[in-house]
Image: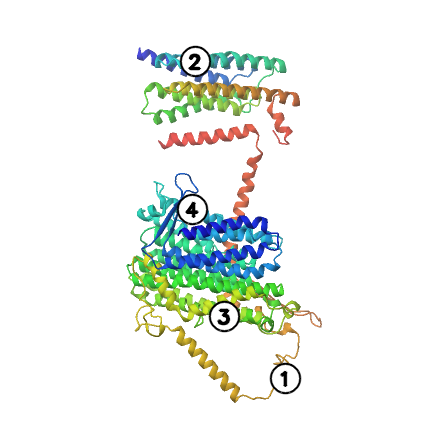
Amino acid sequence: MHGLAFDVSHLLAGGLVLVSLMLLYQDRLYSLLNVFALHAVVLSLAVAWQAHIQEAPHLFVTAAIALGFKAILIPVALHRMVRRLGIHRTIETVVGIGPTMLFGIGLVALSIMVMLPVTEQADALTQEDLAFALSVVLLGLLMMVTRRNAVGQVVGFMSLENGLILAAAGAKGMPLVVEISVAFSVLIAFIVIGIFLFRIRERFDTVDVQVLERFRGEQP
Amino acid sequence: MNLILVLVASLFLAAIAAMPLCRRPVGRPAVYGFTFAVCTAIVVAALPALSAAEAVAARVLPLGIPWIGAHFRLDPLAAFFLLVINLGGAAASFYAIGYGRHEQANERILPFFPAFLAAMNLVVLADDAFVFLFSWELMSLASWALVMAHHHDRGTQHAGYVYLLMASFGTLCLLLAFGLLAGTHGGYLFPAMREGSLPRFAQALVLVLVLLGAGSKAGIVPLHVWLPLAHPAAPSHVSALMSGVMTKVAIYGLIRLIFDLSGPPEWWWGVIVLVVGAVTAVLGVLYALMQHDLKRLLAYHTVENIGIIYIGLGLALAFLANGMATGAALALTAALFHVLNHSLFKSLLFFGSGAVLRATGERDMEHLGGLIHRMPVTTATFLTGCAAISALPPLNGFVSEWLTFQAILISPSLPQWGLKFLVPAVGAALALSAALAAACFVKAFGITFLGRPRSRAAAQAQEVDAFSTGAMIVLAALCVLAGVLPSLAVDALSGVVETLTAGARLPQQATMPWLSLIPVSAARSSYNGLILLVFIAVTSTVVAAFVRRLGSHTVRRSAAWDCGTPDPSPITQYTAGSFAQPIRRVFGRTAFRASEHVEMPEPASLEPARLRADLRDLVWEYLFAPIASAITYASGRINALQFLTIRRYLALVFAVLLLLLSGLALWQ
């Protein structure tokens, strides 16, 4: 049982990193949102598996929140938003896809190099979990940095948040309050960013943040 | 102890009460009268604590940081500095009752003046690092506000800015020094620091930090740059407080931290302090000689006197490190006595310069002259102060410098060769600075008060009010008293010295015959101010009588200064610039890169020839200007960070995060 538990959680956490890397090379908005929904699904599976092996029922709630909000509600809302704004454009990246992917792989390596020695005292499962979680966080940040499109930045931020939840679920004994607050903070961030998107759109007819930079009198 | 704390608290209340009062005519005498009364009361209350080494009083008040409180302690060292602070404070308050009458900006002075006094008192009473640093900073800020009272005057804003920078730098250094002393357990109470023992290098670091922190406030070279800017910019009674008293609080900080808190000294600490003191003394007086602004000249002399005090303290450190407790007691007595003396005569001289400023509106000596006929009391008291600061017997400045020399004379028994060679050189520097100081005050007094008036304002000057002259007379009398009866002061200091040298002290002076001062033994050296005073009085009376007797009695009237210059214009007189010229030529070439340029007119032109002397402040040019330009360059570069886009900010955060993570990965 122990071997199986380890393997499955390893698979799911690794899957989350894989989906994060997939997020990096999406160049259409819809596909980006779909992959993000997949990301949240994998996250909720991983958290649910943690709940199962840790025998911590409150983690099921976390998994349900992740599934409900992040896999369904937010992607659907973002879909609607994109449709209402009328943007079916490709996503412009600052750096090309190839270098970004290479850099992302480097980040994964870095987080494993950092995390494994630091968490030597913890059991193997937590170790792997934390290393993967850190790479998801770093990949989310990388996505925020390399995307010009505001929607892309929102998705990057959300995937970063997913990494945090993965880490929290892996560390045993995290109270539910924290998870709920994290979920709500994400929701609020989503609302704020949504409104922000509409405002940008109203003002500049685009959600490309490069226009904002030009508006501030700077060269892109 | 309780009484003193209540009195200090009443000073704070006075600062608050002064805010509504300051625009009314009654406010000025009320505030200054109150501070005068409180300072006098603190002097009286602190006097008994000087000697009572066993009756050290400590109090904890529930102020400040919750659960820790504010710790206060009154030991002989604190009592002595309370005495210095409040003597100066009382004199300045009394002086200001009259001086402040013509002050235009009373509303910018009255609230800060009591707060400044209270903060200085609190520094001395503090028994934990929080209270010490808080009151230290309060002292800096209150004095800064007082410096900025005349902020419309040219140069004042620059002075305030430099002062604020140096003050915060000094406090930062002290903060770090306390951090080291507190150790990893966070023992921020002074008793805990006394108990604790530091590793050697940490002790040395504490010494350097304290020299930077307390030294920048005291004005040691090269950290003195703010002092001659800020001290003269303040109103004169505040200048007197800053120069005469606040620099002494800085000396207190050094003594408390180095002698009391940071453990047994090493001999090379003495070397550092001695070298700093000697350089400060000589350069301070050279700077002063080049000045023709009366208040700036006095401010530079503060730098010099701080150097003399540092020499005494450095000797004490060297003796203490070698277990020569008697020598340490002698050097400490000299330093502490000079602290008292300097506070007396420097306050007196600043009062005098304030009186001149009030009467003529001039600080530049080249526009003064001949005031002896119009301001006789100010002249007499100023002359007393000049003689005292020039270390002329039988005044007090002589006694403390003489004691410092006595300490230097027993230095050959020190075991380290470095000290054996260094101390005589320091003694030579001290002698040089004393001689130059005398020259400087001949210039300051002669150009300002003697000769003929060089401007209409000087010709129409009138003696200042009774309060101002009263304060000056009292201080002059104290200078004479401390010079004629030094035994009393030395005996009073013995309690303070005992606490710092583990029980060693000078022999009891009151029992010496004829009130002589015998620091080590009668066979070595002794000084008797009283006999000297009587001798000077008798000989000068006799000489005067003989001159009158033998001289011609016929009265002749002739043109003044008619020594081949029948021109009656006062600009043909000897000037401050001409007085300083020989010294500028000897020392200024190296110390200030001084250069002179003569501009001759064309032949047959009626233009006057001009002599221009250029001086450069090397400390400013080679130390502070490069630092300032480096900071300007760096901040100009970093300023670009204020205008990045969100994505670039994110990238920056990301890059820093990656850097830290890879550092972590590599470091493991």
- Give the residue at mark 2: A61
Pointer 2 local density, CA inside 10 Å: few below 14, some 14–19, many at least 20 = some
- Residue B354 location, quadrant: bottom right
In the image, is residue B399 above or below residue A80? below
The Cα–Cα distance between marks 4 and 1, rounded to whole angstroms, is 67 Å
The Cα–Cα distance between marks 2 and 3, rounded to whole angstroms, is 89 Å
Question: Residue B376: in sight, yes or no?
Answer: yes
Q: Secondary structure at mark 1?
A: loop
Left or right: B396 as drawn, with respect to B415: right
Please tell me which residue lies in front, B430 or B547: B547
Q: Residue drawn at (57%, 37%), measured in percent from left and top?
A: B640
Q: Secondary structure at mark 4?
A: helix
Callout 2 touching callout 4 (CB < 8 Å):
no
Q: Nearer the viewer, mark 4 or mark 1?
A: 4
Say if labels 2 and 4 share a chain.
Answer: no
- Give the residue at mark 1: B557
Residue B374 in percent (x, y) is at 60, 71
Say if labels 2 and 1 share a chain.
Answer: no
- Give the residue at mark 4: B131
- Give the residue at mark 3: B384
Give the residue type at disc 2. Answer: Val
